[in-house]
Image (cartoon, rainbow, N blue to C red):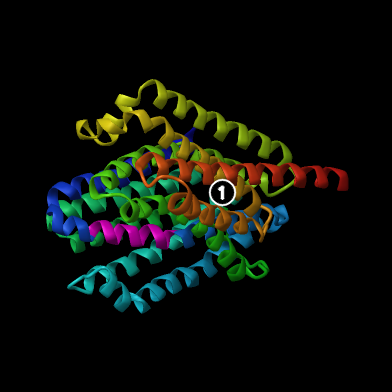
């Protein structure tokens, strides 16, 4: 519950930045900021991959060497963080053209922000892998508060997209320094041999990036397949889906170390039950109170979405369960699980473009079916794998 509270605080503060900036910056500058925040979201996938790999590595280290291993991966992750920032700078001319920006400075600050953001992923991985959930929650909260306060201050004081990103950079950097202090006792100075860290991070990042595409591409398809009004209504439905998607995230965070060692069988059962149960409660609540869900997400202008509110919460719940199942495969370094995610993306495109009507309901149904297909595939694979492992033992 401590981890859940810290994650919830971080999410609320992230939304607060957008809410304040939308009012302080005006439509033109907020459009630029929305694009920059999207770049940060995409770049943060590397941090998530780094977190998963470090947590898995530490769980599987001998107890006596876990501290030294944590120090080693924290040191190496600085190189990864700098590389992410440098790669963003390298493609900044292309981003400048794609986003139609008149100034290069916002992209410079995005690249700079990704450096501490990626290093924070390593710190979270250390706390998660050492199963120190109080410290894990503290890092989540420190980064969320730093980023939220910095972003709000930048938006209010500077009233430009660049000033807002500078505020986010300063707050994130402060959060990274606090996080390093929090995990210091978990990573005493020392050295341990870590095999193929970069290769493992690349694989985990690839898998999580594929999931990121699956959980966000329907909004892009809405812009391509629907008219402007329906696309806007679909966007509000996507907000409902995101709430259902993020709500059970803490379960996977806490369970991940247990999914990587001998406790896996029971942990997987509890994780699937907890994530599925929370998702079912969200769907039920949305079905019983659809007007409230739509009113909170979009307001009175989106009442036409009320009959479909439950479907969007179902999308989020399915994707949340798919994420938990994917994490269970990453916990044992399964290199084939990502194929199922790309197959679900292909299924979504076929259903949305070729099979189902080009409407809000049609696109939402296509998205839900692709999520359901991925969940069923993951569950079948998990059952087969656990039976095989049991027979082997």
| Tally of numbered tags | 1
Q: What residue is rendered at 29% in x and 44% in y?
A: 15
Asked if residue 349 lies in the magenta stretch, the reply is no
Q: Which region of the structure is painted magenta? A: 33-44
Query: Measured from the top left, where is residue 364 in percent x and y?
Result: 42, 42
Viewer-side residue, 64 vs 308: 308
Q: Left or right: where does residue 390 sit relative to residue 191? A: right
Please say whether residue 129 is visible from this viewpoint. yes
In front here: 352 or 150?
352
* Image spot of residue 240 (x, y percent): 37, 37
Q: Label 1: few (<14), some or many (≥20) within 10 Å?
A: many
Q: With 201 as the anchor, is 3 left or right in this view?
A: left
SS label for mark 1 = helix
Residue at figure coordinates x 35%, y 28% from the top left? 307
Residue name at image x 50 percent, y 40 percent: 250
> Residue at the spot x=47%, y=45% of the render?
366
Residue 94: percent from left, percent from top: 32, 76
Give percent across and percent down for residue 1.
49, 32
Main SS, magenta residues: helix
The residue that disc 1 covers is 128
The image quadrant of residue 300 is top left
Residue 130 showing in the rendered view: no
Q: Quadrant of residue 247?
A: top left
């Amino acid at each position: 519950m401590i981890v859940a509270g810290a994650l919830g605080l971080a999410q609320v503060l992230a939304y607060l930045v957008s809410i304040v900036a939308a009012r302080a910056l005006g439509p033109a500058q907020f459009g630029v900021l929305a694009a920059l925040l999207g770049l940060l979201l995409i770049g943060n996938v590397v941090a998530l991959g780094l977190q998963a790999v470090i947590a898995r590595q530490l769980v599987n280290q001998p107890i006596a060497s876990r501290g030294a291993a944590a120090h080693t991966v924290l040191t190496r992750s600085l190189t990864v963080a700098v590389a992410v920032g440098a790669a963003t700078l390298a493609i900044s001319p292309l981003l400048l053209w794609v986003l139609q920006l008149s100034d290069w400075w916002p992209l410079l600050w995005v690249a700079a922000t990704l450096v501490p953001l990626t290093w924070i992923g390593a710190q979270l991985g250390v706390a998660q892998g050492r199963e120190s959930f109080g410290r894990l929650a503290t890092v989540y909260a420190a980064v969320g508060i730093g980023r939220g306060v910095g972003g709000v201050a930048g938006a209010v004081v500077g009233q430009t997209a660049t000033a807002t990103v500078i505020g986010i950079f300063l707050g994130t950097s402060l959060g990274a320094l606090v996080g390093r202090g929090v995990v210091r006792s978990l990573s005493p100075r020392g050295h341990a041999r870590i095999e193929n860290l970069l290769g493992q991070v690349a694989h985990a990042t690839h898998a999580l990036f594929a999931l990121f595409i699956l959980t966000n591409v329907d909004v892009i398809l809405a812009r391509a397949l629907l008219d402007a009004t329906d696309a806007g209504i679909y966007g509000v439905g996507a907000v409902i889906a995101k709430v259902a998607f993020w709500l059970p995230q803490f379960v996977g965070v806490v369970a991940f170390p247990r999914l990587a060692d001998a406790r896996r069988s029971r942990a997987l059962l509890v994780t699937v039950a907890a994530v599925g149960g929370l998702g079912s409660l969200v769907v039920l609540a949305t079905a019983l109170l659809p007007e409230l869900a739509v009113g909170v997400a979009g307001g009175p202008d989106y009442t036409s979405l009320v009959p479909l509110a439950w479907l969007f919460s179902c999308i989020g719940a399915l994707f949340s369960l798919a994420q938990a199942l994917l994490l269970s495969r990453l916990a044992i370094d399964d290199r084939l699980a990502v194929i199922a995610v790309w197959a679900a993306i292909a299924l979504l495109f076929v259903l949305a473009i070729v099979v189902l009507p080009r409407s809000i309901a049609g696109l939402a149904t296509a998205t839900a079916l692709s999520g359901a297909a991925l969940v069923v595939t993951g569950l079948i694979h998990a059952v087969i794998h656990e039976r095989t492992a049991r027979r082997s033992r």
